[in-house]
Image (cartoon, rainbow, N blue to C red):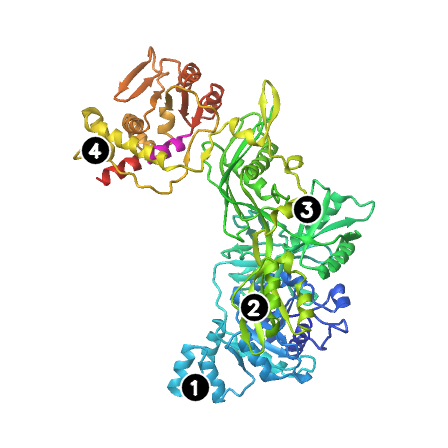
Amino acid sequence: MNRVVIGILAHVDSGKTTLSEGMLYSAGEIRKIGRVDHGDAFLDSHEIERDKGITIFSKQAVMRFRDTEFTLLDTPGHVDFSTEMERTLSVLDYAILVISGTDGIQNHTETLWRLLARYNVPTFIFVNKMDLNADRNAVLDELHTRFSDGCIDFTQNPENEDFRESLAMCDESIMNTFLADGTVKNQDIRNAVVQRKIFPCYFGSALKMEGVSEFLEGLELYTRQIIYDDKFGAKVFKIAEDEQGTRLTYMKITGGTLKVKTLLKGNKKNEWSEKVNQIRIYSGAKFQAVDEAFPGTVCAVTGLTQTYSGEGIGCEPDSKNAVLEPVLTYRMELTDGIDVHTALTELRHLEDEDPQLHIIWNEQLQEIHVQVMGEVQLEVLKRIIKERFGIDIEFSHGGIAYRETIAAPVEGVGHYEPLRHYAEVHLLMEPTEKGSGMQFAVNCSEDSLDRNWQRLILTHLKEKAHIGVLTGSPITDIKITLIAGRAHQKHTEGGDFRQATYRAVRQGLKMAESVLLEPWYEFHLEIPTENVGRAMTDIQQMGGTFSQPETIGDMTRISGSAPVATMRDYQMDVTGYTHGKGRLNCILSGYEPCHNTEEVIAEIGYDSETDIENPADSVFCSHGAGFVVKWDKVYDHMHIDGIKLDQDDDEEENVYQRANDYINMVADDNELMQIFERTYGPVRRKVASYTVKKSTPDRKSHQKSKPVKLGDEYLLVDGYNIIFAWDELKELAKDNLNMARDRLIDILCNYQGFKQCNLILVFDAYKVKGNVGSTEKIHNINVVYTKEAETADMYIEKITHKIGKKHRVRVATSDNLEQIIILGNGATRLSANELLQEVKLAEKTIMDIINSN
């Protein structure tokens, strides 16, 4: 049987639920047609929906008509609950857009049309309330003007030549067939519908059951067989609870099958592994428990506790970020005697069910703030909270929901080291594309920080809604990458990394150039032409922008964008000065830099320095006691080298000049030339000069920003440690350790010539009886073999202690114990992988010079 998931959408009061009832009745699924105003509709089963006479929660019903099984998803029509509607779009095969024949295309209807286009959902149109003397031709003209020329009246006789010609004008395949023999194939129509080239339109009255059966026949005829993958996939679109408090995960099976007791796993964003306890197929308020769900089935699953709306499971990717977002924020006021933290815990369940319902805890003010779409949603929210949690609440006057981001990359550092605790975290924070939200990544060597600590840091980054430093608003459009971290073998605990991670984020935000963002509307304003001057002046005063006005008859259409803060109540003004003729349609276009940043910051009055729950300062330890280092001084105390985010042309030129000088020197030194050619191949002529090409350089490692010691730079390399850390040398060592050792010497000779540091390569010889140790000069590096009973790390510790007071010392090793010794003697550590990257950079630079001459 063909399974088709179809959603029904409309502006409120267009007759959407009534049409759903009529379709279910025509398909024989219900015996009586319910009505919203009578409170007995099959799908509007919740008490709040029956009291208010509107759909608030998306519902599903299964109906079978001929050879097709339709899963009908009824969605809310009121704009305040449009986020609930948008979540269903990701699982639809087709959509039904209901339009009131008497009201025409209303503001929210245009929003729905654009959302259907964004999600690429093939759409059927049902024009309702035609029994109220609506003008069919006028509605069709409006559909062509405001939607698409592909809106075709399918109530015509299929043999009508005008009808077939209209179809042919929409699709090339149909046109070719029509020109060849004058016919139009149903399969070609189905294909054009799927490609959103044709939008079949039907007319009738759902209340009087006029045109409903014909519409259902059209759905069955012009929806095509859905082909699903054999590999399992599912898309989560809703989280809810049943009357017993059982968590339900609503999903559509998009490939393979799902059986009870199957172990499902989350994706990379949210790693989890849980079994399916029960599979429910809902139809209205009732459900049927099944053992297996097949492709195309929409079901509710129990047993999953960590899923989220929009999540892809199996081969299915996550949904795109939602277009509709709440732009208003209200302060929640609890009645006396209710613990605010208990209330917050309960409210998190609602946030889990509706991801666009943002519950924000303002620690500084000890207040709960809620971000919603409008006041009707507030009324419903109050009632739901009372029914489910027994908590009475009120809301204060609403304000704008702001966000914050950063203007340029910055390194955030957090250090937490009170007595017997230790953790340091380095984060690269980069601005990303508008609307991309928060992204998290890892680019940290496991040589320097174990994988389990890295995962813990990622968990801490994701578990909290981090706030900005300008207004305390949530941050967005930032990619945070873990680039370095350090733990202590004895003193590090999990909570230490939480502290270090939070502080690193805040320190980065304090160091960055923060940008305050506010929500903006994309608007379409239709007004009588004589009111254009007034409208354009208003938009400019709002801080908005608009394109060239478009005249349509005696009306003018102005499209543009403007801040929500200034346009949110503009519809009332439009109604007033156009005497009810003007229409304003707004949809959230995203967040843009705030048009009155200083004014907003001053009004909110957030002080990041006094926010003790979100500190930017770090805690270090000295002489057995912890002490606080201010956020702007952390770079001077951190234990790990930072990164350099900028590199000027002079520094880039110095790098290439150093390499060029080394190549010239090689040409005059026979011994070094032999080593050089073993790495780079024969060099036939001397390279005299090299022209630097200016470019935007990659970020490169550099020393942390603390006073640099005078004197030469020394690099101490633990030879065998590096050999067994680098894959190339490790493979060589399996066959011949001497060969691997000679290869490392060659590599480091070339590296030293490029780097111009004092390089000491240390090999363990402590097991050789009677060995007194030796040092030999192999061209430009010192190779040390330790004496009996002296390990390489013991030698390195001794030398570091001796020369570290007057010279800059780096030690290349992956030995964890040696790392601690290095820090204690004032040196800085270079992991095996970091040394390898520096070597590759040197070799690449040298090869660039050789190849360019």
Foreground disc of the pair 4, 1: 4
- Quarter the C terminus occupies: top left
State whether the magenta stretch is mostly helix, strand or loop.
Answer: helix
Report if the CB atoms under discs 4 and 1 are less than 8 Å apart: no
Mark 2 nearby-residue class (10 Å; few <14, some 14–19, many ≥20): many
User: Which of 679/494 is in front?
Assistant: 679
Mark 1 nearby-residue class (10 Å; few <14, some 14–19, many ≥20): some
Image quarter of residue 802:
top left
Image quarter of residue 92:
bottom right
Q: Which residue is mark 3?
A: 603
Disc assigned to residue 558: 2
User: Which of 625/541 is in front?
Assistant: 541
Q: Secondary structure at mark 3?
A: helix
Q: Which residues are magenta?
A: 831-841
Q: Which residue is mark 4?
A: 688
- Quarter the N terminus occupies: bottom right
Instruction: Give the residue type at disc 1.
Output: Thr
Disc assigned to residue 566: none
Residue 644: x %, y % from top left: 44, 35
Q: Closer to the N terminus: mark 1 or mark 2?
A: 1
Disc assigned to residue 183: 1
- State how far apart marks 3 and 4 are (Cα): 64 Å
Residue 674: x %, y % from top left: 20, 28
